[in-house]
Amino acid sequence: MKRSWSEAVVEPAGLLLSADVPASRKKAYQKNKKRCLLFSKLPSEIRDVIWQYVFGGLAIHISDDALDYNTCVAKVCQLHVDPELEAIHLRKGEQTPYHVRHLRCFEPPDQQSSNPCDQPQALVSILRVCRQIHDEAALIPFIANFFSFARFTSLSRFLDRLVPAQAHAIQRLAWLEHSNWSSHWSQTAGTALRRRVPSLSQVVVFVEFRQASIELFLRNGHTRGVRAADLSEFLQGLAGGFLAKADVAPLYHSSRLKNRDQFKGRVWHWAIDEERHMIRGAGDDTERELGC
């Protein structure tokens, strides 16, 4: 039975590596590889550029299936702005709520369209052409794309469905949180996620206040569950304890809020105070960026 793109990527049986070719077919495998101009004429560096162009450069929304929580649904972001730039736009005054910004992303796909963004399965169909291409490029979709989640719990379910090689290849993540933060905001949770996604180099977190949380803040001076320190601890764990800066602040100052009427229907965004943070890996001098 032919599987959809989301099933092929999110619930794989495993990677088809050349080392797994049966001995009886090794000779034919090597012969076909020598005959193929893609592998015999183009150096691996050029092929890698091709794979990055074919499979990369996208923001991919992963969400739970509304009818089956054991299944994930993948959609290509229609915003044409990666989450890092999206966060920068928020700093410059953009106040449109997350789900409004990404409304087109979750519309039913046009089944008649030839645009790969409307038919996401076409983006990885080339991996099904032959074992040699799969062997060389199967992890590129995980390395070269930004994976975005409507909530943190969807990220956890997504990782549960990946084989280790796929999870280890992911480098960039983004997700949305509402103002009632859950218990996953802790240094221990950040460390656990780091172990599951060891190649992670960039994270973008969008946090939105709901009206009830704003009213609670105006009434009591604080809002239940929203602690900037929690996110700071989480990022410290995610960075392996080597995060240089983790200052968290609301995009709009909240110390002088008096009139609750002016906040009705408005969504607030929290973000890391610095747009980028440098992470130094333990035991080495390499530096990576964590954009928030």
Image (cartoon, grey):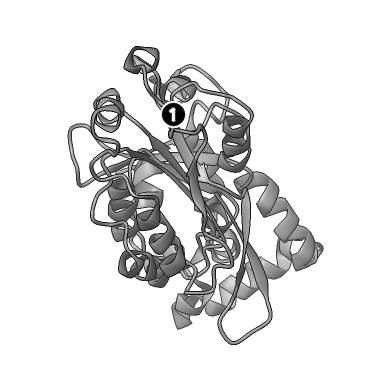
> What residue is drawn where x is 59% and y is 87%?
283
Mark 1 secondary-structure assignment = loop
Give percent across and percent down for residue 164.
39, 69
| Residue on which the image places disc 1 | 256
> What residue is drawn where x is 50% and y is 25%?
118
Quadrant occupied by the N terminus: top left
Give percent across and percent down for residue 189.
32, 65
Based on the displayed image, in which of its 4 quarters is residue 177 positioned?
top left
Q: Residue furthest bottom?
A: 283
Q: State left or right for residue 48 relative to residue 238.
A: right
Give percent across and percent down for residue 123.
54, 40
Give percent across and percent down for residue 58.
58, 41
> What residue is drawn where x is 38% and y is 20%?
108
Based on the displayed image, in which of its 4 quarters is residue 3 positioned?
top left
> What residue is drawn where x is 39% and y is 61%?
234
Q: Residue furthest top?
A: 261
Q: Nearer the viewer, residue 212 or 3?
A: 212
Compared with 168, 80 (above or below) is above
Q: State left or right for residue 42 relative to residue 184.
A: right
Total count of labels? 1
Q: Nearer the viewer, residue 289 or 230?
A: 230
